[in-house]
Image (cartoon, coloured by chain):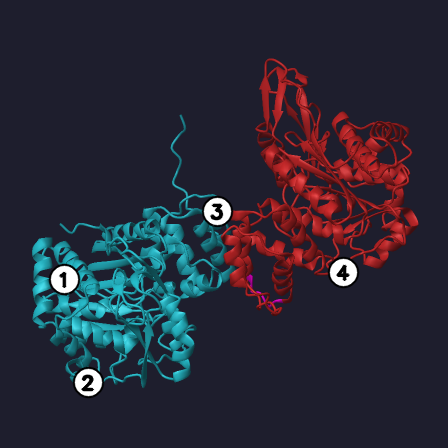
Chain colours: A cyan, B red
Amino acid sequence: MTEPTAASPSPPLRAVDLIVQKAAGERLSREALRWLVHGYTAGTVPDYQMAAFLMAVCWRGMTEEETADLTQVMVESGRQLDLSDIAPVVADKHSTGGVGDKTTLVLAPLVAALGVPVAKMSGRGLGFTGGTLDKLESFPGLRVELSVEEFRAILRRWGIVIAGQSPELAPADGKLYALRDVTATVESIPLIAASVMSKKLAAGATHLVLDVKCGSGAFMKTRAEAERLAALMVAIGQRAGRTTVALVTAMDQPLGMTVGNVLEVEEAIATLRGEGPPDLVELVIELASALLAAAGLAPRPEARERCRRLLASGAALTKLADLVAAQGGDRRAVDEPGRLPHAPLERPLLAPQAGFIQAIAADQVGRVAMQLGAGRQRKGDPIDHRVGLRLLRKVGDAVRAGEPIALLSAARESDATALLPSLLAAYRFSETPPPPQPLILSTYGSVD
Amino acid sequence: MTEPTAASPSPPLRAVDLIVQKAAGERLSREALRWLVHGYTAGTVPDYQMAAFLMAVCWRGMTEEETADLTQVMVESGRQLDLSDIAPVVADKHSTGGVGDKTTLVLAPLVAALGVPVAKMSGRGLGFTGGTLDKLESFPGLRVELSVEEFRAILRRWGIVIAGQSPELAPADGKLYALRDVTATVESIPLIAASVMSKKLAAGATHLVLDVKCGSGAFMKTRAEAERLAALMVAIGQRAGRTTVALVTAMDQPLGMTVGNVLEVEEAIATLRGEGPPDLVELVIELASALLAAAGLAPRPEARERCRRLLASGAALTKLADLVAAQGGDRRAVDEPGRLPHAPLERPLLAPQAGFIQAIAADQVGRVAMQLGAGRQRKGDPIDHRVGLRLLRKVGDAVRAGEPIALLSAARESDATALLPSLLAAYRFSETPPPPQPLILSTYGSVD
């Protein structure tokens, strides 16, 4: 038996010891993570120690509790919005990103029209196509760089707001992300989860719905990875007292029929009018109903039905127009999409053979869209909102040889000529129809 | 079949891509490693990318060929000595370090006296006790910071020289080591091997003998790790065209009977007079004979016999005196060790019980020596050459209760009082003698 000893002050923390612990596969306490992350944000823990730590996390992983702790200390690194004076329930939605993913432009107005305010901050899209902010900026004059005060005011007045990520929120994430990007430490599921969730938690929504995509066009290539990420983010949200649900969804072919900023906005408008493509409609209804059910507003089947009816009625389109107008855009463009800028030329891709479309590789389609100018390779690159492509047939559809299967919207004839063969390379054809693949793969969080 | 294409210039290398490759467990080419290491040395690859790369190496390891390539590009980062104008065979020896390890002070004069010139550069000891340089500096006036020109001149004139590591040799190693130290990336066998061998290869010796220690008092705690390191260093040396042999040796109890700088110098002198303790004598003979046999100067049994006879004759002591004098020390101290500085007081550790000594934990003894002032905790800390301890009994010896088993040489009574209990904590006693443990565990390289 040992005698109880007087409480002694904790020894001072040293970054190198925390790296040793993580490299040995141990878990760090919240206090240790707080010291490390806040020291890094303040500049007292240098880049090279944080880089070694991040690689050790890629190696050894983090427990769920540890990841929740990391997320929390990242939240603490900056301002934390409290929206409870505006509404008791405020929803937010996040997608890990895919090709043709205009879901937010449909889901946010739909949920807002159902009476749940939606307050979303987004990052800028890097990679294949623009992100939600870029798509919104297809509306001439629309501003996404809002102050926190503007963000709150628009939410209060209109029940819907979508803005760029405020640098005041979770600044540790911005600094860590920049370091991860140059040290090959991006692809760690705990680090991805903490990055996403720190921004969501700081932005103040009470209810979160997450769309974790997997497949060739997504960041997560395998279903197993996507499911780990989804489960982890739901756990982080719930530990932080936010109602969180996540759907793991397929991203092998592009979502919907369009890829490119204005083209996707037009498709979102059509969907809000009840004329959406089946996969986008299904995804929006599944995500929105999961959110409503998790919020206790309706049982899931009823929530689905309410979403379906509202989409079909076209009544949620007003909320998109409200959003556009509130953020400085021209609301008339919602009713008359002809007012949006359009590419000067459109060229068809012809089916090289008869049969069935077996696959349309989303990543390859994304590369074509980026090369047309719809996305950005480097931060700050300009994007051309007009360009992109329209799919006329999707996976499982029968095609005749020589029939147009897609239309490329380009700024220049030379782009179209150069990229039609690249687009064709995304397709695989077969003589028999491929087996149908589900869009919704799994669900995390309590939605029933 | 694909058509042959015109040779295209290699794409430019990017550090982040090399980190991605290593984190994915791929092997890097020599060209890639050269670009990375030379860029780091030149300052164009930043610390944080190198830190992430080093942690990825800790995670994924390196192949033998890759480690040899890394070593080679580290060698290329600085000056490379060519000693072939001085002698066709020049020997060097390296130990991974242990408690009471004065082997170099015996081995170098012995090998030089056998006609093989010895040119050794050493790093400063960190940790338990001083390194070889600190031990040599026990001789008042002796200089270990030699220019390359002095190093060559002393080697040419006396056939023996031991100097501090020249900053002109393998500067990449110095910069990398400093980074590894603060990013918890020290304990990677490929990185350890490349660090040691880059300095050895740059220093120009043709024949290398390596003492890789394992056990509680060594950097490598397990025999398996030590054997991996030994095999890897031998492979690196041989790929670089140097005759290289390595012995894996036990470091569970201190080597010999003394720990501390002057005390170890005195023991080395006694050993060169034919009065050494059995374990130190055995280790010196095994290392020296392996070197001689690998160099083709004598078959191993004959080499052992020549070493044994020379040690017993005391004739090699002259070579130590030559070394001391050539580097500015007083050669009379070799014959009259009373001229060396001694601690003012000596206090005995008494056996608390009768029986057999079952273990003397080398790391614990090392900590006691460091706390007495014999080693340094931080780079640049001063050390007290006088202090340390003398073991009167070793593992396997019988002791009577109350009999002195060790003598502590201290600068202050308070140190002795405080540290005698810590020294006692290093001992374990048993009622029956422990089974004898071999000192030499395994051998790498061609020595027969």
Whether residue B44 is in magenta: the answer is: yes
Q: Can see residue A12?
A: no
Where does residue B414 sit, x and y in percent of width and height?
61, 37
Q: Earlier in the sequence, mark 3 or mark 2?
A: 3
Distance, label 3 to label 1, CA atoms, is 41 Å
Where does residue A81 sit, x and y in percent of width and height?
24, 66
Distance, label 4 to label 1, CA atoms, is 68 Å
Depth check: give the residue in front, B85 or B333. Answer: B85
Mark 2: give few (<14), some (14-19) or many (20+) Cα within 10 Å.
some
Residue at mark 1 shares a chain with residue at mark 2: yes
The numbered mark at residue A330 is 2
Q: Secondary structure at mark 1?
A: loop
Q: Disc 4: which chain?
A: B
Depth check: give the residue in front, B313 or A405. Answer: A405
Q: Amino acid at mark 1?
A: Val
Q: Disc 2: which chain?
A: A
| Residue at point 61%, 70% (across, down) | B6
Whether residue B373 is in magenta: the answer is: no
Distance, label 3 to label 2, CA atoms, is 54 Å
Classify residue B394 by image quadrant: top right
- Check the picture and name the quadrant holding the N terminus of chain A: top left
From the viewer's perspective, is B28 left or right of A55? right
Distance, label 4 to label 3, CA atoms, is 34 Å
Which of the two discs, 1 and 2, sits closer to the camera? 2
Magenta-highlighted residues: B43-47
